[in-house]
Image: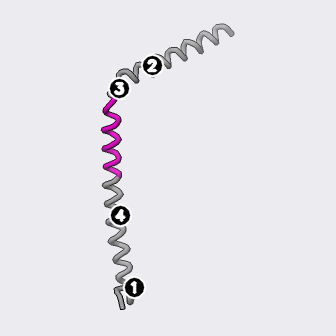
Amino acid sequence: MNTLYTAATRMTIAFLNRCADLDVRRDRGSGVVETIIIVAGFASLAFTVYLAVAGKVNGWISKIPGSSGP
């Protein structure tokens, strides 16, 4: 049982050390830049989908008799 605790403790310490090493080596500003790029990409994709759907909906509405006004 003592060996099990020792092995578990060593694995936990190794994991914590690995996490600490990753945190120290990471570039702190890169996460912000990547997030901005991802958000801008999704915004442009959403705008493109909006334009496509709006064009389709306007096309369907124009086919309805009497939809253009009195």
Kind of residue indicated by mark 1: Ile
Instruction: Give above or below for 20 relative to 55.
Output: above
Q: CA distance from mark 1 to mark 4?
A: 21 Å
Of 11 and 30, which appears nearest the observer? 30
Q: CA distance from mark 1 to mark 2?
A: 65 Å
Give the magenta-colored segment's residue range.
28-42
Seen at 35% across and 57% down, the residue is 46
Image quarter of residue 11? top right
Q: Secondary structure at mark 4?
A: helix
The quadrant of the rendering that contains the N terminus is top right
Identify the residue position indicated by label 2 in the image: 18
Image quarter of residue 5? top right
Seen at 40% across and 19% down, the residue is 21
| Label 3 or label 4, whichever comes before in sequence order | 3
Q: Secondary structure at mark 2?
A: helix
Can residue 26 be found in the magenta stretch?
no
Q: Residue furthest bottom?
A: 70
Q: Position of residue 3 (x, y in %)?
A: 64, 8
Identify the residue position indicated by label 1 in the image: 64
Kind of residue indicated by mark 2: Arg
Seen at 31% across and 49% down, the residue is 40
Q: CA distance from mark 1 to mark 3?
A: 58 Å
Instruction: Give above or below for 54 relative to 28.
Output: below
- Would you call the spot at circle 2 few (<14 residues within 10 Å), some (14-19), or many (20 or more)? few
Magenta stretch, main secondary structure, is helix
Q: CA distance from mark 2 to mark 4?
A: 45 Å
| Label 2 or label 4, whichever comes before in sequence order | 2
Residue 20 is marked as: none
Identify the residue position indicated by label 3 in the image: 26
